C-alpha cells in the first residue's frame, strides 16, 4: 500500500498506537481514504482567511458526526479530539448544544458515548457546571445572546410571529439560546461554528444554515474559514451536503 508518510504521522497523532483492522480487510479503500482525509484535505490549498487549527478541526468533526448521526465514528474520534486539545467540558458542550438542533432522540446515544468515554479515561462525572442562567432569567439572557450574535433586530423576536406559533419563537430565546448559548465552556464563535456543522451535516436545513453562516461571519468566522471547515468535514459527510453548505456560505456572504 502507498499510504503517505504525512497521513501515517497524522493518523498516529490522532490514534497513537492504533492499527485499523481495515488495513487487513479493505487495504485499497484505506489507502485512498487515509491519503485523502489525513493528507490531501489537511494540506488543502491556502485560500486565506482565519486559520483552522487542530483543536478547532476536531470540534467541527465532532459536531459534524453528531449532525450526520455517525455514532461509531464519533466514538472513535473522541480520543483524537482530546489528543488535539479539545477538553472534556468542550466535548460535553458540543453534545449538549446538539439537542437544540438535532433533538434528544438523535443525541441520546452520543451523550451515552461521551459519558462512557470520559469515565474510561478516569474523568469523574458530572463535570463542573457551566450554566450561567436560571429559570427566571433565561429568556432575557437568551434574547441578549441572540442580539449579540445576530444583531439588534432579534431584540423582540421572542414575541413576534402569528399568535398560534409565537411560543416557538419564545422557546428559541429561552431554551435554544437561554439554556445553551449562555453556558460557559465555548464562546459565541465556537457555538456558531458547531451549529453550522450540525446543520450542514444533517441536511435539509438550508435556510437555517444560511442564517447561521451569516452569524458565523458576524462573529469572526469569515467566509474562507467556513469553506475550510466544510472542506475538513467533507470526507465525513460526503459531497452533496458539503456542496449544499458551500452554496449557503456563498449566499450568506452576499
Image (cartoon, helix red, strand yellow):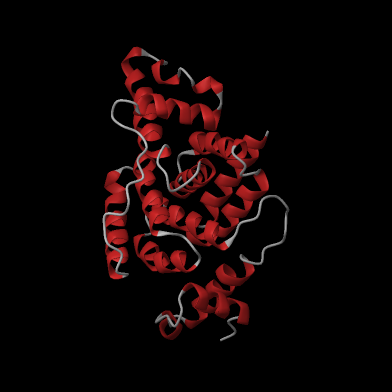
Tell me the quarter of the image containing the C terminus. top right
Residue 54: x %, y % from top left: 56, 63
Q: Residue at x 38, y 34 (%)?
A: 176
State whether residue 20 is above or below residue 184: below
Which residue is the extreme one toward the top? 163
Q: Nearer the viewer, residue 158 or 72?
A: 158
Q: Give residue 11's position: percent from left, percent from top.
A: 52, 75
Instruction: Give the left or right position of residue 124, taking residue 193 as reference.
Output: left
Q: Is residue 74 left or right of residue 251?
A: left
Residue 96: % across, % down: 35, 47
Q: Is residue 80 above or below residue 115?
A: below
In this rendering, position of residue 23 left or right of residue 128: right
Vertical placement of residue 248 versus 65, above or below: above
Specify the quadrant of the image occupied by residue 219: top right
Quadrant of the rendering where the N terminus is positioned = bottom right
Rendered residue at 39%/68% (across/down)? 76
Report the front residue among 238 and 104: 104
Residue 248: quadrant of the picture: top right
Tag count:
0
- Is 148 positioned to the left or the right of 102 in the image? right
The residue drawn where x is 32% and y is 21% is 167
Q: Nearer the viewer, residue 17 or 31?
A: 17
x and y percent of residue 120 in the render? 28, 70
Which is nearer the eye, 241 or 190? 190
Amino acid at each position: 500500500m502507498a499510504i503517505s508518510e504525512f497521513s501515517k504521522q497524522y493518523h498516529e497523532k490522532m490514534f497513537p498506537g492504533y492499527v485499523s483492522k481495515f488495513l487487513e480487510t479493505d487495504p485499497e479503500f484505506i489507502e485512498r481514504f487515509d491519503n485523502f482525509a489525513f493528507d490531501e484535505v489537511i494540506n488543502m490549498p491556502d485560500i486565506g482567511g482565519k486559520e483552522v487549527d487542530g483543536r478547532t478541526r476536531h470540534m467541527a468533526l465532532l459536531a459534524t458526526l453528531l449532525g450526520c448521526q455517525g455514532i461509531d465514528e464519533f466514538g472513535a474520534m473522541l480520543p483524537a479530539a482530546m489528543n488535539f486539545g479539545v477538553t472534556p467540558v468542550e466535548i460535553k458542550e458540543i453534545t449538549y448544544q446538539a439537542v437544540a438542533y438535532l433533538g434528544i432522540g438523535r443525541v441520546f446515544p452520543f451523550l451515552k458515548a461521551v459519558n462512557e468515554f470520559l469515565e474510561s479515561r478516569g474523568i469523574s462525572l458530572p463535570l463542573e457546571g457551566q450554566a450561567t442562567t436560571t429559570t427566571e432569567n433565561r429568556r432575557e439572557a437568551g434574547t441578549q445572546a441572540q442580539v449579540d450574535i445576530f444583531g439588534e433586530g432579534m431584540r423582540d423576536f421572542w414575541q413576534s410571529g402569528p399568535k398560534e406559533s409565537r411560543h416557538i419563537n419564545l422557546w428559541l430565546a429561552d431554551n435554544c439560546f437561554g439554556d445553551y448559548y449562555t453556558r460557559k465552556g465555548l464562546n459565541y464563535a465556537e457555538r456558531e461554528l458547531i451549529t453550522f456543522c450540525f446543520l450542514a451535516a444533517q441536511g435539509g436545513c438550508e435556510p437555517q444554515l444560511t442564517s447561521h453562516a451569516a452569524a458565523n461571519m458576524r462573529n469572526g468566522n469569515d467566509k474562507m474559514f467556513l469553506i475550510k471547515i466544510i472542506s475538513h468535514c467533507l470526507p465525513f459527510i460526503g459531497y452533496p451536503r458539503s456542496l449544499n453548505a458551500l452554496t449557503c456560505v456563498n449566499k450568506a456572504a452576499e
